[in-house]
Amino acid sequence: MARSTRVPVLRRLHALLPAGRILAEEQHLAAYESDALTAYRNRPLAVAVPETADEVIALVRFCRDEGLPFVARGSGTSLSGGSLPLVNGIVIALNRLNRILKLDPAQRIAVVEPGVINLHVTAAAAPHGLHYAPDPSSQPICTIGGNVAFNAGGAHCLKYGMTSNHVLGLKAVLATGEVVEFGGAGRDQVGPDWTGLFVGNEGLFGIALEVTLQLLPRAECYHTVLAGYATIEQAGDAVAAIIASGLLPGAIEIMDALALEAAVAAVHAEYPPGCEAVLIVELEGPREAVAADRGRLDAIIAESRPVEARPARDAAERLAIWKGRKSAFSAVGRLSPDFIVQDGVVPRRRLGEALRHIDEWSREMGLRCANVFHAGDGNLHPLILYDGRVPGALEQAEALAGRILRMCVEMGGSITGEHGVGVEKRDHLATMFSADEIDCMQRLRAAFDPRLVANPGKMFAEAGAPALTQHGLHPLERAGVISRE
Amino acid sequence: MKTTASGASPLTPTTVAELAEAVRSAPRVIPSGGGTKPRLAREGEEFYRLSTAKLSGITEYEPSEFTFTALAGTPLKVIAAALAERGQYLPFDPVLLKAGATLGGTIAAGISGPGRFRFGGVRDFILGVRFVDGGGRLLRMGGKVVKNAAGFDLPKFFVGSAGRFGIVAEASFKVFPRPPGWRTLRLEAPDVATKGRLLMELARGRWEIDALDAPVEEPAVYARLGGVNEALDPLAMELLTRWNGAALTSGEAEFLWQTVTEFRWAHSGGPLVKVALVAAQVEEFLAMVRAQPEARGWVSGGGNTGYLSVPAGSPLPKLAWPAVMLRGDGPLWLGPTRRFEIMQRVKAALDPQDRFPRLDA
């Protein structure tokens, strides 16, 4: 007997959407059982595939009335397990709510549905000389709804901020069933910042139905430099010198030797030989400004004694530099059957110290660890390599991850820069916040979701949270279709 | 530290712990900082007043991190001076700095100066807060580093919340390196339609305009560029080739932008209101202000913010946009306000006993 008729709540759920848009067959559910935190899988009761905002609203109200947990899902690229399904709940797949409802070049805004893919916003804005700034590595596939829920970052956060800095307003259905509209088309608002509170809620408040995004004029000109260094400390010193100079680059990234090796294997990226680290710095702006800043940057880099510095000579070379960087995470999959991506933040001046600890601890624990990070904002992404087939290996990798996160908090940083807490770091929330503070967040959450049906088990460690089981890389990731940041 | 409610001398905590204790000691409480936006701190007689005057000082400043942390009562000018010494600044142009505004009041009011146009406002630079909730608990939310996604974003939520959900004790902000040079241009805009159009056209161009304002009274739009000096002259030249106008001297420019950030264009008394505009409705805003003989107005942030001032005793025009009164008599919130059940529910979660003013008060 099919699960849909066996479970009474599913029979009632079927009444909400036309035939074929409640998936409850095992072969369909299998596709949804994991997100980009591939170490974990859960098979949901069913997957609902709404096509309109009204259908989403009806689904959320149904879940509220039935006490049925739900997880909203876009493309499933969350690295913190944010869209990991619940075995006793449903997935609301928002991919068909993928319309750009409005694009107003004069006011530089776009109003989009949650299933719109990040890069599609920029593609739609490009003919008007505009772009959408937040650029997580998964941008060719991740959706705005997920970006909003997890306050996604990217390589350009130091100068442009995160998703929340680009969301001007939104319409959402809350877990209470209430439909709300916060903010609007203006960049400046009056009253408490409800939009700001909603962004980054990790799916615990409800589901965004329409999101108003600010668009920025596309930079006229870029100057992207890739510099290889004999040691990672030298690369770190170069970052410090750039920051001290008063320049405000759009991006400052570092990849270490193991990450470089992976990028070479995956996308045939080419790096100066004999380098333990590569630094990528990008300036952007009007051509006159870039021309002036470029001289200063080149001089700083020359003084930092790189093995070699390679400025991108044209758009193709710039894209190649970024391709190597943005594919690095998935590329690590070629070096190891499994890996964990971490996302801690340390004060920038302590980057070198943090990397030394990570290196020491990974040697001590017999683990390999690749490092790719947003050096401009102290956001580390250690990739801890392990083999899930070896008993205890995942636990060992998680022990190292935990050690790194505790270090981040001790240094005055954060357990997550851009991936969110999700399932992955829920046990570490208490490292960063006191019991009173977590209680305050729980009170807020209960205001939005008194029945605790919206993405339970994420952000907070609590009873009834889904059990976690480990698995390997996502098949699409293995194939190089999707990537992590 | 028990005193009487409004009318008596305010509670004046000297540490964040004392602030929490002061909140616990008062059944109803309203904070005040520099008194530059007095409407925010004015409540009924049952409210104890709490002054942040002695809760002042920069607690951490790490120029290499682009971050600082300061107590709520710290005057903005103290912060701006410390940042300037290290070649840094708050890009949103803190408002009423010379008049004595504090960091806490700036957060509570949620107002940013003309510089918010390029990189964003107070909400975009706040990183973390320590605050006292309605239960008198001292809590920390957000962080002290430039990038952080852990927990709900209460720091942003507090921007513009007028102390309805908690009293900020200390806040951490991101800062940027200060551009080496500035140029301000006065571009002619003979009528309201041109003014509205010019604001949007300038905002879309390649020039990376830093501030974009338009006084209601003058047939002009002011555009400011910030960056390396070698780049500014050709960019300014291009703008002046494209539109009629002239460059201001640095003295004129400084005077102009201070006129904006200190509200020197406004009537010295009477209601001063911030209006949440959208760029496409600048024309309507200009027309509304002009329709009332005694009203004065200013459009800031590329047409995303409007300010309106009328002399004491004059009625405010009916507003078609959400607005907040910074000084003067009358309701705090003006214009159309959207109210949802969740707002009261969040209020109840953070301040169950209404120790702070009610949402609509």
Image (cartoon, coloured by chain):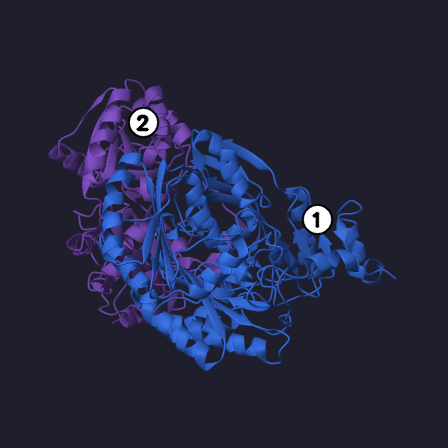
Residue at the front extreme? A273
- Distance from the alpha carbon under mark 2 to that under mark 1: 49 Å
Callout 1: residue from which chain? A
Query: The disc labelled 2 sits on which kind of residue?
Result: Val
Give A391 or A62, whichever is nearer the viewer.
Answer: A391
Instruction: Kindly identify the residue that appears in the image at 27 percent across and 46 percent down.
Output: B91
Q: Are marks 2 and 1 on the same chain?
A: no
Callout 2: residue from which chain? B
Q: Position of residue B220 (x, y in %)?
A: 25, 24
Q: Residues within 10 Å of mark 2 (few under 14, many from 20)?
A: many
Residue to which mark 2 is pinned: B289
Drawn side of residue A32 relative to residue A407, left or right = right
Residue to which mark 1 is pinned: A49
Q: Nearer the viewer, mark 2 or mark 1?
A: 1
Q: Which chain is blue?
A: A
Picture quadrant where residue A215 is located: top left
What secondary structure is found at the residue carrying circle 1?
loop
Drawn side of residue A199 relative to residue B80, left or right = right
Q: Is residue A10 visible?
A: yes
Q: Position of residue A385 (x, y in %)?
A: 53, 70
Q: Position of residue A200 (x, y in %)?
A: 49, 56
Relative to A368, residue B34 above or below: above
Quarter of the image that includes the N terminus of chain B: bottom left
